[in-house]
Amino acid sequence: MQTNLDTFPRRLLEHGRVRPLHPAFREKHLGIWQTWNWGQVNAEVRAMACGLAALGFTRGMNLAIVGDNRPRLYWAMLAAQSLGGVPVPLYQDAPAADMAYVLENADIHFAVVEDQEQVDKLVEVQALYPNIRHVAYDDERGMRHYRQAGLISCAKLEEMGRVYDMAHPGFFDAAIAAGSGGDHAIILYTSGTTGKPKGVCQTHAALIAAGAGGVGFDQLTADEDILSYLPMAWVGDCLFSLAQAMVAGFTVNCPESGDTVLTDLREIGPTYYFAPPRVFENMLTTVMIRMEDASAIKRRLFAYFMMVAKRSGSAILDGKPVPAGERLMYRLGSLLVYGPLKNVLGLSRVRVAYTAGAAIGPDLFRFYRSIGVNLKQLYGSTETCAYVCLQPDGNIKFDSVGTPAPGVEVKLADSGEVLVKSPATMDGYYKRPDATAEVIDADGYFHTGDAGIFDAEGHLKIIDRAADVGHLTGGAIFAPNYIENKLKFFPFIKEVVAFGHGRGEVCAFVNIDIEAVGNWAERRGIAYSGYTDLAAHPQVYGLVKDCIEQVNADLAGEALMGETQIHRFLVLHKELDPDDDELTRTRKVRRKFIAEKYAVLIAALYEGKASQFIETQVKFEDGRSGVVSADLKITECKTFPVVQAAA
């Protein structure tokens, strides 16, 4: 029996002992779900670890992991940890230059990747970073004629490992025994919103503390099912698919591909679900598009029962008193609308759902809770294992991220910045003691860079990134993310960038959602040739203007934010894209970069121009570059008198 479970490999051995036949991982392959139990996963990790050792991977080395969520990639992480090494997951859609920076910064010589696409990337990257000696690949399709030195399939790596294991009895167990909770368990690179990504070193002890805290908080058990589909390089996936899975022993399900996630979600019916706000936004957009195409009777039925849900759904979910008549109507709504809707979304079995990674709009939050999905927010960062605040059941506030998680201390600096002291705080940035010293003070508090306030009940409210919060020239607080999230609730709007700091009023760039607006346009007989053409259409501008004016009316009712109503806007001629450096890989806006890149458009907004011509260089999916140009229309919006706060 393992008595000291302070590392993930030791927890792996314990799961193999306690629940050897319990499903540990599933993967959908060629339309069929394949299952590995904890006993089989132990054998797979052992073989892979010994195979890596046979190739020369030793304690203290870093192992790159590149690809979509695949069981064997998670096993590679555990295999590296078993040998005292450190896995370094990379974003699978990162261009070669970004990948080369991380590989070089992390001193990578070994990599385990998903398929031919990722092998090709690493071959391309070798021109920039030639130090990778060994690459193991999971999917062998297309790899038959590859003859580069150091390439090996994961199947052959494991064969080699089994031979090595037999020739070195006791090696694997001794390697695990040599590890400790203070060893680095993973290096996760930040999204690089304001500069080059930094490698965040998290120890086994820190990740296990975060995992155990969340498991205890929501009473998770080994019987949970989760869908693992978010980037393995993101801290959210590390927390849910690695840390919490290895603490609770529940089942991690990997979808067949990014295109089949919604189908696979419905088939698995997870009991525990995690997604960033953009995923919940996309789900809602899909629902609204389908309702637009539904019959008049179905649309009226949906609208009526959604009003019932809005009035009482959240209160019922929280166990609060609701009149009998309302409860009866809500039950009828569950039968006719909410139940089928949750089934279509794959959320029928969800007991706990979380969102994090960016602020979620209160309206979006309210929608899911009103139909009976126990959606909650958590707050954290890569540097804190995504473990700072959690929302307790029965005490959910739409405008807060909850109360400090068990074992975590949160306070506010005089500037309003959120400071955190926690057992889940990072060990430091890889090879960057200078950067570490900038964010962790002498008292051990991590400076998050977020601006927040506590309400009377101790719930933390995040206003925005501290660096992004500013003021209009009239003195009103300007929190761009707050405004942007309100607009992104509308299914027609995919992205917004608001401007206003140091200016007299707020203006904005808008990206339309091509699927939602395209569906809307087709039903009205509006022809278009692509995103740029559709974005410039006068009726689309009218649609966006209506959305903005609804938000302006909403903002006018908030004394603190009323002065930050949007006065003018334009619809960008292209979608903001990580490949064009406008968004991070986790789809966070790079505000400074966008402000510099589109300075001519910002100037036109504030100079009162009716339009502005622009040419923009873009990168296509096949690696080619091109130019997109357009004459962008600038539109005025109606603003509303601000409701003054009561004295």
Image (spheres, rainbow, N blue to C red):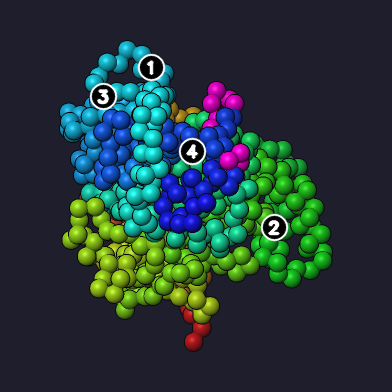
Question: Of callouts 1 and 3, which one flags the residue occurring earlier in the amino acid sequence?
Answer: 1
Q: In whole angstroms, how far apart are the C-alphas of marks 1 and 3? A: 17 Å
Give SS at disc 2.
helix
Residue designated by label 1: 142
Residue 360 lies in magenta, yes or no?
A: no
Q: Position of residue 1 (x, y in %)?
A: 52, 51
Q: Give the range drawn in magenta.
A: 20-32
What residue lies at 46% left-to-right and 55% top-to-bottom?
5
Give the labeled residue for mark 3.
150
Is mark 1 in CB contact (under 8 Å) with mark 3? no
Expressed as whole percent of the image width and height from the top left, the position of residue 596 reads 22, 50
Task: Identify residue type, mark 2.
Answer: Ala
Q: Is residue 117 above or below residue 12?
A: above
Amino acid type, callout 4: Asn
Q: Nearer the viewer, residue 227 or 293?
A: 227
Mark 4 vs 3: CB contact within 8 A: no
Residue type indicated by callout 3: Gly
The Cα atoms of the two marked residues, 3 and 2, are separated by 58 Å
Residue at screen point 38% across, 54% down: 204
Q: Which of marks 1 and 4 is nearer the N terminus?
A: 4
Secondary element at image label 1: loop
Please tell me which residue lies in front, 565 or 288: 288
Q: Could you give the CA–CA distance between mark 1 and mark 4, rounded to whole angstroms?
A: 29 Å
Residue pointed to by mark 2: 309
Q: Is residue 392 above or below residue 550?
A: below
